[in-house]
Amino acid sequence: MESHLKSPYRRFHRKWWTWYANPMTYVRAFRWYYQRATRGWADCDVWGLDSYICDVMVPALEHLRKTKGGVPVPPDAVSAAPDNGDAADEEFKRWEVEWNKRLDEMIAGFKAAEGVINGPPDRFFSERPAAEVAAEEAEAARKDAERADGAKLWVSPWNYDREGAAAWTKEQEAIRQKGFATFTEYFYALWD
């Protein structure tokens, strides 16, 4: 009699009903959609505002770089004479190249911030040899038996390159600081 309760369909059905068919799932989604449409952000966005801003700014800056209608003119720029169209075109192209570099710095800064928020990439983790893990688990079991609080030690099957991850984080932080400084400097030039 109990075998039909353990079927994969029942387990799927129960999980599906508790989340996807729950009306509150859609009420929340609609509420957040409405909040984003009316005020630009939703209540759920402030749970990780740093991540949300990076998620929004990277595609927005990439779109600005691709579809810009003009470029900001540096305040110390000397423009070409209005009757010389070729010189003005060359100057515009030079400003456009400079502006694209600045936008690329901003994009790299927000991507670096997003990378630091999400943590170091998987390349800093490597699987440990099974014999090494088994030896450490045996040692942990011995220590567990000696503990008075009953807590168990956990043995990771992964090696973590702390120095490499710290160097990567420092590098990403330098990119973020440079990109955010450029973003701050050219904040009022972010128009299309």
Image: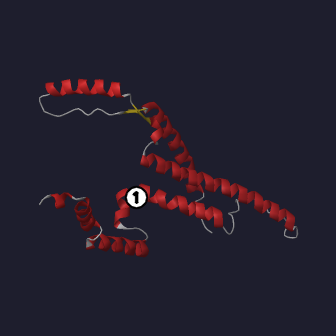
Number of numbered discs overlaid on the protein picture: 1
Q: Amino acid at mark 1?
A: Leu
Please identify the quarter of the rendering in which residue 142 is found.
top left
Looking at the picture, how far across and down is residue 48, in whole percent? 38, 56
Extreme residue in the right direction: 83
14 left or right of 118?
left
Which is more toward the observer, 146 or 18? 18
Whether residue 57 is situated above or below residue 165 in the rendered picture: below
Q: Quadrant of the C terminus?
A: bottom right
**Residue 14 visible in the shown view:** yes
At x 51%, y 43%, the residue is 172
- Crowd rating for badge 1 (residues with CA inside 10 Å; few <14, some 14–19, many 20+): few
Looking at the picture, how far across and down is residue 19, in whole percent? 27, 66
Please identify the quarter of the rendering in which residue 184 is found.
bottom right
48 left or right of 111?
left
Q: Quadrant of the N terminus?
A: bottom left
171 left or right of 16?
right
**Residue 76 visible in the shown view:** no
* Element class at badge 1: helix
Residue that badge 1 annotates: 49
What's the coloring here?
secondary structure
At x 52%, y 60%, the residue is 57
Please identify the quarter of the rendering in which residue 98 is found.
bottom right
Looking at the picture, how far across and down is residue 25, in whole percent? 29, 69
Which is more toward the observer, 78 or 48? 48
Which is more toward the observer, 183 or 172? 172
At x 64%, y 63%, the residue is 66
Looking at the picture, how far across and down is residue 38, in whole percent? 41, 76
Whether residue 110 is situated above or below residue 153 in the rendered picture: below
